[in-house]
Image (tube, rainbow, N blue to C red):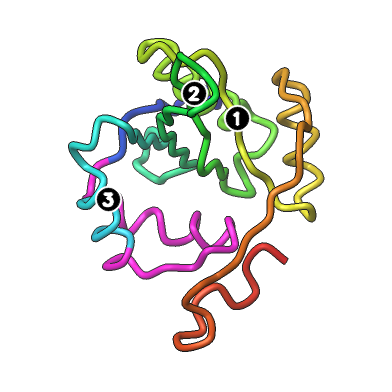
Amino acid sequence: MTPHATTRTVRTADADGLVPLYTTLSHPATAAQIRSRLERLTGDPTYELWVAEAAAGELLGFAAGHLLFPVEDDAPAAQLIALVTAEEARGKGVGTALCAAFEAWAVERGAARTMLNSSTRRTEAHAFHTRRGYTASGVRFSKFLWYQSTGYGEGLGR
């Protein structure tokens, strides 16, 4: 990782700094929306969220993990549900550090495996995850249930 950056658990006060990262992830949101989501997840032991923070305080990356209890396995699994780094921080170890935090959290909770979803258009992310030992093992299908009445999901996952 960049010499003057650290990885830590996210705080609701990080909401403003997360806005550009959410946009980079193709999921634009306001600081108020992000703050509300963080508050909803705080205290839920099946979720954890991390940021990579530069010494000057700017957020260089964000990751989120979710512990799942699959019906087909006895052990839990952990899903990396979000990973994004700022453009200027790519290739500097930020994503790797965030993944390491996620994987350590998964091991601490007894997860037998980790998994993630990635948009078909994010080929650089696919290469990153392959270098970290992940293999493609399926196809994700999505259906946005609210789209007809609210427009939610328009343009996502395409």
- Residue, far bottom: 149
Q: Percent position (x, y) of residue 43? A: 18, 37
Task: Describe the element under mark 2 as helix, strand or loop.
Answer: strand
Q: Which residues are magenta?
A: 11-33
* In this rendering, the label closer to the viewer, 1 or 3: 1
Task: Describe the element under mark 3 as helix, strand or loop.
Answer: helix
Magenta stretch: dominant secondary structure: helix
Q: Percent position (x, y) of residue 31? A: 31, 65
Q: Which residue is mark 2?
A: 77
> Which amino acid, mark 3?
Leu
Q: Residue at x 33, y 35 (%)?
A: 47
Q: Residue at x 78, y 32 (%)?
A: 136
Q: Residue at x 59, y 24 (%)?
A: 96
- Distance between mark 2 and mark 1 Cα atoms: 8 Å
In this rendering, the answer to whether 32 lies above or below 98 is below
| Other residues around mark 1 within 10 Å, as few (<14) / some (14–19) / many (≥20) | some
> Which amino acid, mark 2?
Ala
Choose top left, top right, bottom left or bottom right for residue 130: top right
Instruction: Give the mark nearest the N terminus, 2 or 1.
Output: 2
Q: Which residue is mark 1?
A: 115
The residue lying toward the viewer, choosing from 11 and 110, is 110
